[in-house]
Image (cartoon, coloured by chain):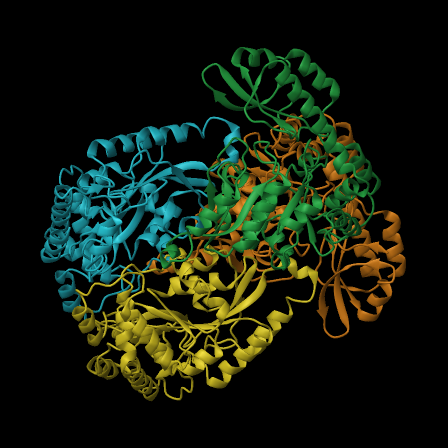
Chain colours: A orange, B yellow, C cyan, D green
Amino acid sequence: MIKFNCDYLEGACPEIMDRLLKTNFEQTFGYSEDEHCDTARSYIKAACDAPDADVHFLVGGTQTNTTVIASMLRPYQGVLSAATGHINVHETGAIEATGHKVLSLECRDTTGKIYPDQIEEYYLAHVGDDSFEHMVQPAMVYISNPTENGGLYSKAELEAISAVCKKYSLPLFLDGARLGYGLCAPGNDLFLPDYARLCDVFYIGGTKCGALFGEAVVITNDTIKKDFRYMIKRQGGMLAKGRLLGIQFETLFEDGLYERVCSHAARLAIKIKNALIEKGYELLTDSVTNQQFPIFPNEKLAELKEDFSFSFWCKVGEDKSAVRICTSWATSEENVDLLISKL
Amino acid sequence: MIKFNCDYLEGACPEIMDRLLKTNFEQTFGYSEDEHCDTARSYIKAACDAPDADVHFLVGGTQTNTTVIASMLRPYQGVLSAATGHINVHETGAIEATGHKVLSLECRDTTGKIYPDQIEEYYLAHVGDDSFEHMVQPAMVYISNPTENGGLYSKAELEAISAVCKKYSLPLFLDGARLGYGLCAPGNDLFLPDYARLCDVFYIGGTKCGALFGEAVVITNDTIKKDFRYMIKRQGGMLAKGRLLGIQFETLFEDGLYERVCSHAARLAIKIKNALIEKGYELLTDSVTNQQFPIFPNEKLAELKEDFSFSFWCKVGEDKSAVRICTSWATSEENVDLLISKL
Amino acid sequence: MIKFNCDYLEGACPEIMDRLLKTNFEQTFGYSEDEHCDTARSYIKAACDAPDADVHFLVGGTQTNTTVIASMLRPYQGVLSAATGHINVHETGAIEATGHKVLSLECRDTTGKIYPDQIEEYYLAHVGDDSFEHMVQPAMVYISNPTENGGLYSKAELEAISAVCKKYSLPLFLDGARLGYGLCAPGNDLFLPDYARLCDVFYIGGTKCGALFGEAVVITNDTIKKDFRYMIKRQGGMLAKGRLLGIQFETLFEDGLYERVCSHAARLAIKIKNALIEKGYELLTDSVTNQQFPIFPNEKLAELKEDFSFSFWCKVGEDKSAVRICTSWATSEENVDLLISKL
Amino acid sequence: MIKFNCDYLEGACPEIMDRLLKTNFEQTFGYSEDEHCDTARSYIKAACDAPDADVHFLVGGTQTNTTVIASMLRPYQGVLSAATGHINVHETGAIEATGHKVLSLECRDTTGKIYPDQIEEYYLAHVGDDSFEHMVQPAMVYISNPTENGGLYSKAELEAISAVCKKYSLPLFLDGARLGYGLCAPGNDLFLPDYARLCDVFYIGGTKCGALFGEAVVITNDTIKKDFRYMIKRQGGMLAKGRLLGIQFETLFEDGLYERVCSHAARLAIKIKNALIEKGYELLTDSVTNQQFPIFPNEKLAELKEDFSFSFWCKVGEDKSAVRICTSWATSEENVDLLISKL
């Protein structure tokens, strides 16, 4: 059974495993205060062209989302998110556990994106009158890129969101769990320095992009920087052997490995997409990233499932189903070709 | 300026003020452990035909909603509510402050009601598969009667909701901030014993129904009863001079005062409604309760606002606006007639 | 049975009841945005000689403590308090419910006071090293005056605490649930303008000092002022008929009623204290406020309890017990004389 | 510089690194639902002689403590802990972030242990009277073994604690961050089946005992088992590539590796302890575990710090300091001998 369910099916790229092995008996202090973390931080700041940024490493996405959001909001404030956003749907209430409401914006299309006018409209509908004291105050914006649905913001789109956020003093937080696959998507024009320039805080996903685990949070907004390590600890995200995170990001950002492994996945995803189109399958959404959402007749799906495993996404009428096919840094071209041959 | 904005514009009905005055120098122990509270509890249990119920008194609605909800849910669970429900819109995140997500169900109509199949569908879409561990578990149902929008559930409707809740072991909590006005609405067929029989917990609103303040929580579900007073204290809802609540509910439930004061409001609301219809005004929703939602041309509204004050509800196109007109136990027939004469 | 258990055994002073009655049919907007609240706010600001302060009204102490504390702390910060402080012992975890640890300082004496060097020592032991990221950051100081144990800070003492707080940027919050009895205690040299000058925020207790209920929060620190009403609502402390609070504090602060009713209690407490000393009873602590803590032989206590009721405080050896005797605005001289005659 | 500061200075034992490498390209589903986790769970249940236990894997200690505690308590309840317990001192308020108070018990000695009569006394002082509704309800007991201070409970001691917990229906949670070093300490008579029999839930620490990271939670109490995975996710402890945890614990428990690596550390700690005693140094506490707390004259300490690094523990008078010396699975005998030679 060849699995295409998600982008965290395997361990880590071999370069990372090598480095972990090589450094295994080094003695370092804990909690990301070691030299590997320092080096990784300097690499990332350089890659982001953001010398004054703060960079922190956390183990996983839920921790990162809760830590960032809880550090940015006062108790009565909430975070704007696409209705389909990860924090609104797939965190088992971890955001609410920090006392904050996720203020959901309905998605207009299948991309999972939100648009500046939605932010503006929501914001303006909640200020300027005492009656709003009875409602959660919108106070930050959460987006992910690529989105949960494989959508990808363009530079112009992110600039427009950033502008409306600045206009209303709403800090912008970008969840980059799959950032690497966005960086390498065909037609992408958003790069690390853009993220650092346009967001108040964002994270560079490791777990899904070549690492065993780990997310690198980049903070450019000074207010959010303050005491962020206390927040990490309080939210359960402070790894004892922090150097494990440092070593991984050091390896990924030392000489472009992050983009290399993600490019591989992006190329294979497009190869699959092209084959799907060529063979006449519909796509639920037009994704340029490592997640593809073909719609298969149920019969065809049953046939494919003899050899392959996908994530079920949704029913499309009675006779068809949309599934998610993910490629990753670890996907082999051989398996992709096998899949294409069975389409 | 005559105000019709809401049903909490005045103090309390004179019978309550008299009783507060008469008892002012009695010495009683605090925290609702006095004889007035005991008497009020017994009156309410009798009125609900629920001798085994527990009855607690809280000062206001937000406290009541947070205390009940937080006492019923485990940390990863959420509460189903109409999207327009009070807890989803008008609590400044007080529910989320207790760590719980409000799971909103879109309203199908303007009544603010939800329907059993919506509950069932939501519930079934979140059980039966490990993948739901990544989502908030739906674990109780919140409704209000009358609703935020003046809608009123029939007995058949509440029975159907109660049945689906029992089927899936979802406790049912009914917010009765305006319960009195529901009891006295024309055509209403839901009475206190029905609420006690069909809900796991509900509250009888005092603040908007003749009292200075205060809500009486009636708990029939044994699990929720346990240690509820600890919850009240923890949520900041334990009034030092608890007898103030006891005295008020004692007065309201001793000889039918609660229904008497609410009937007055209901009759005046219908008088206004009939006048509105007669004079050709549209209504946003067909309410039989003390809240009426006429749509006025903006010009007419400006004219009325010289003498009367309403709550703005929403724009209806460019030229019209819906407002809320509330009657209450304190509304005078004279003022209602004056309003009608100006329509 | 004559009760001396606490200072919230009766309703409210007659002047307040009269005013509530007189205003009962006025129509006012809710949520403390009415004229009575405005007037009460202006009286209190004048009494505090603090024209730029913000004044808010809440129903009770737990709400007030949680709302103030939660509005002042970032998530990883805690509040310093005497180990015997109300927030550390008698709030059923309401402070922790807002996500914050109470950092307790052991009391050196029976007064329930803490001292500036304790604050300084605790603070200095938690800064200056990365290892403190693993501990709750001390970030504000809570005291009450009079204390839970009847102790009273002098002006010099409060000035010294305020100075150490300012030195380390620790906002100072003073719980004044019994402030009125402190203002009127013999030898007291701390008055409202001192509180406003020395604290970042404090509250003037109404519930125990002549009102039916209600506490007036006075905020002088601009940071704490921002969006405080959102916090009140979120914490369940926003009273619908806010004018009830305004009317009560308007009455108490219009012409010195607050001090008058408290002076009465203070005088009677000292009368009891002097009688106790004269008759040779020990006192647990040397209180000058409306709470007195005599130590009675168990036999004598049993005898007194035939006619009087007190709060049990603690055992003193095998044969004696300390109790709390409270006077209040409502205590009659007749009952005090009766008690003295039985000592 | 040779570091003895803590037991998480290096990576993982080579057997674990080998296994991670060997399995790196296996495709497994996420979130600990893979075969490695299943195997590890079965090994651990066998080692604990607890076939009906549930076993869960989390990344680190803070997550584990918050997840377990938050899953066991109702909102108004708190957890009893030694004043020096990790959850009371070194979690930056992570427990309070879940809404619960840590109820601290003063330690009677330098071991960091608590005793059954302390639990009983605290419990009995908080039940049986309505006045306790104003206080946090003690509802579970937290201990760690070995303790934060290197103390080790005997089987008789744990049985006595367990008995008092059962008597009062207080679930017992044992933090085993260093459990392995306890299992291998000279004189230890507490083994895994004892923990499973005597605790409602406990965890077997991996991070400090040979793994890269990871803690294995063993739940024997059925109430706590329910929906625990929802809790893990909500608290940010659900690792995407859960198999990383499974592989590590599979390796540690397949053929006794866990005890082997811990025995090594235990033997070296005792070697250091004996040398310290022989050379006349005092010990802060008589530890039989991998943490030793010698008291050095400041001059001697300065001399040692030229070659070695320790954790500063506390001052002992003006001229001496206590430090912590930790051994671990990774400590080399050579470095220990070097240290001994410099004592």
* Closest to the observer, C102 or B144: C102
Quarter placement of the C terminus of chain A: bottom right
Classify the position of the N terminus of chain A by image quarter. bottom right
C304 vs D83: above or below: below
Residue B91 image point, x, y percent:
41, 61
Expressed as whole percent of the image width and height from the top left, the position of residue B227 reads: 44, 62
Relative to D140, is C198 on the left or the right? Answer: left
Position of residue B164 measured from the top left corner of the image (x, y, whole percent): 57, 77
Towards the viewer: C335 or D189: D189
Out of B142 and D129, give the one closest to the viewer.
D129
For residue C292, above or below residue B308: above
Q: Is residue B300 visible?
A: yes
Q: Is residue B36 above or below residue C50?
A: below
Left or right of residue C71: residue C206: left
* Residue C9 pos. (x, y %): 22, 60
B331, above or below C333, in the image: below
- Residue C227 visible within the image: no
Figure disc tally: 0
Q: Nearer the viewer, residue A291 or B239?
A: B239
Q: Quadrant of residue A291?
A: bottom right
